[in-house]
Amino acid sequence: MAEGARRRTALRRVAAIAVLLAPAISAGEPPPPPTAGPAAPGAVVALGDSVPAGSACDCVPFPDLYARMQVPAVPSVNLARGGFSSGDVWAQLESPDTDDDLRQAGVIMIMVGANDLAAAFDADGDGDGTYRQIAARVGANVAATIDRIRELHDGPVTVLVLGYWNVVKDGSVGLAEYGDAGMAQSATATRYVNHALHDAAAETAALYVPTYPAFKGITGDQDPTDLLADDGDHPNALGHELIARTAHAAVAASR
């Protein structure tokens, strides 16, 4: 398919899903940009890896888009970092500056665990056994992180735990690099981490937000290539918009 046609198809997909998932970003004054300094009261604060950080996209990442979707729009502080594992996020809470940001947050978005599982996938270990063990550690780290967040807050705070469509490369890039067998293995690794994230959210009264159906469809046979950056590993601008709207819709549905 020609690049222009592919992009038009992707735009139609996101537009159609956006209508179903969430209202448009509110009109009126331009939304505030992501804050560079400490979090303001009610801000959206993001923790996690290169996906929420917006790596490989050169676009506004989904946590900042989500902040702009609030009515009224709120500032955002993006503390996600490329390469972070679930243990890195837990260790991040040792910083007083991070704790101060989390105390001020109205919404905290956590998306982490892909790097934990990707290392096992790349090592081509014993599959299920290794993935199960690592996913359990991810779940424990995320649950501990959320428990700490709740300790920092005197009042209520909304904590969103986002799952993955894939913990490694996907779409045409992933298929070319891993082949059918590798893609099946990556799906197994992804299921383990998503189950762990779901359970950590349930254990800590957080809201789990799956991204798998949005990127790959309910049955998993939807090609996410048009939602991914050229590296096949991170969302592009369309993908980030879709994640933000998916989270927005999940919060609305939970109220």
Image: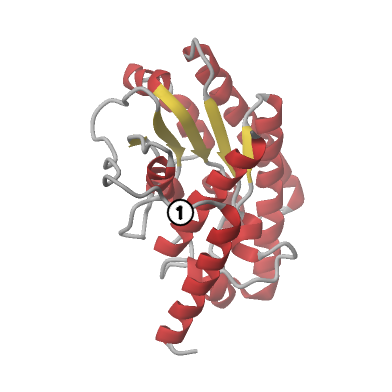
Q: Position of residue 246 (x, y in %)?
A: 56, 51
Residue furthest top in the image: 154
Q: Is residue 180 above or below residue 127?
A: below
Q: Residue furthest front?
A: 28
Secondary structure beneath disc 1? loop
Residue type at numbered disc 1: Ala
The image quadrant where one finds the C terminus is: top right
Is 228 situated left or right of 208 in this image? left
Mark 1 neighbour density, 10 Å: few (under 14) some (14–19) many (20 or more): few
x, y percentage for residue 118? 56, 52
Q: Residue at x 56, y 43 (%)?
A: 113
Instruction: Reply above or below: 122 against 26.
Output: below
Identify which residue is drawn at 64% across, 56% down.
212
As drawn, 65 above or below 238: above
Residue found at x 67% / y 53%: 189
> On the picture, is 212 further left or further right than 158?
right
According to the picture, the residue beneath numbered tag 1 turns out to be 24
The percent position of residue 168, horizontal first and vertical second, equals 55, 59
| Front residue (pair 77, 27) | 27
Would you say residue 60 is visible in this rendering? Answer: yes
Q: Residue furthest bottom?
A: 2
